[in-house]
Image (cartoon, rainbow, N blue to C red):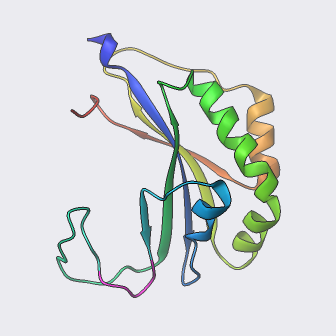
């Protein structure tokens, strides 16, 4: 059913060894996932399957289709990141990256055109844009 279409817009910060969980604090949000390089891998249920995280990551969910269109939600996310320009540049200059991505659950024929102005704003921040596309929305 096309009614099951959905998306989530997230921000992911990654760095080889720096603590990137500060991103969530600066955004005023609780991270969906935060891990530090060299710490034991832990599943969302709290199990430790073995191994160590190879890098530090902080994932923050920013918006979903319940909050507006994809373009509106990406715009809100970019607006939240723009005051953090110096933090993002510092992270990038030390080998890290920040990615805005959409978890996209098309469940049928769908599409979206992203305005050049939005892409320009992302580029000015030095932030990557990505899409994780899934066949159907979970749950």
Side of 115 relative to 20 (left or right): right
Outermost bottom residue = 38
Is 102 rendered above or below residue 23? above
Of the 4 image quadrants, the one containing the N terminus is: top left
Is 84 rendered above or below residue 41? above
Q: Who's the residue at 49% across and 76% down the image?
A: 56
Q: Who's the residue at 68% across and 35% down the image?
A: 76
Give the number of callouts: 0
Does residue 17 belong to the magenta stretch?
Answer: no
User: Closest to the observer: 84 or 71?
Assistant: 84
Res 38 quadrant in image: bottom left
Q: Which residues are magenta?
A: 36-40
Where does the image place residue 37, in percent across and percent down from the top left? Answer: 45, 83
Magenta-colored segment: predominant secondary structure: loop
Q: Who's the residue at 70% across and 72% down the image?
A: 91
Res 120 quadrant in image: top right
Where does the image place residue 109, in percent across and percent down from the top left? Answer: 38, 14
Side of 26 relative to 37 (left or right): right
Of the 4 image quadrants, the one containing the C terminus is: top left
Q: Who's the residue at 50% across and 57% down the image?
A: 30
Side of 1 relative to 106 (left or right): left
Is 12 rendered above or below residue 38? above
Where does the image place residue 138, in percent across and percent down from the top left? Answer: 24, 34
């Amino acid at each position: 059913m096309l009614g099951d279409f959905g998306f989530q817009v997230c921000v992911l910060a990654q760095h080889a060894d720096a603590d990137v969980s500060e991103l969530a604090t600066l955004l005023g949000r609780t991270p969906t996932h935060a891990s530090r390089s060299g710490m034991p891998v832990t599943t969302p249920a709290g199990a430790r399957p073995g191994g160590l995280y190879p890098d530090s990551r902080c994932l923050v969910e920013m918006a979903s289709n319940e909050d507006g269109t994809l373009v509106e939600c990406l715009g809100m996310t970019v607006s939240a990141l723009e005051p953090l320009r110096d933090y993002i540049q510092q992270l990038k200059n030390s080998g890290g990256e920040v990615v805005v991505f959409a978890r996209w659950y098309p469940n049928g024929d769908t599409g979206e055109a992203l305005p050049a102005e939005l892409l320009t704003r992302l580029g000015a921040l030095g932030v990557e844009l990505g899409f994780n596309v899934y066949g159907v929305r979970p749950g």
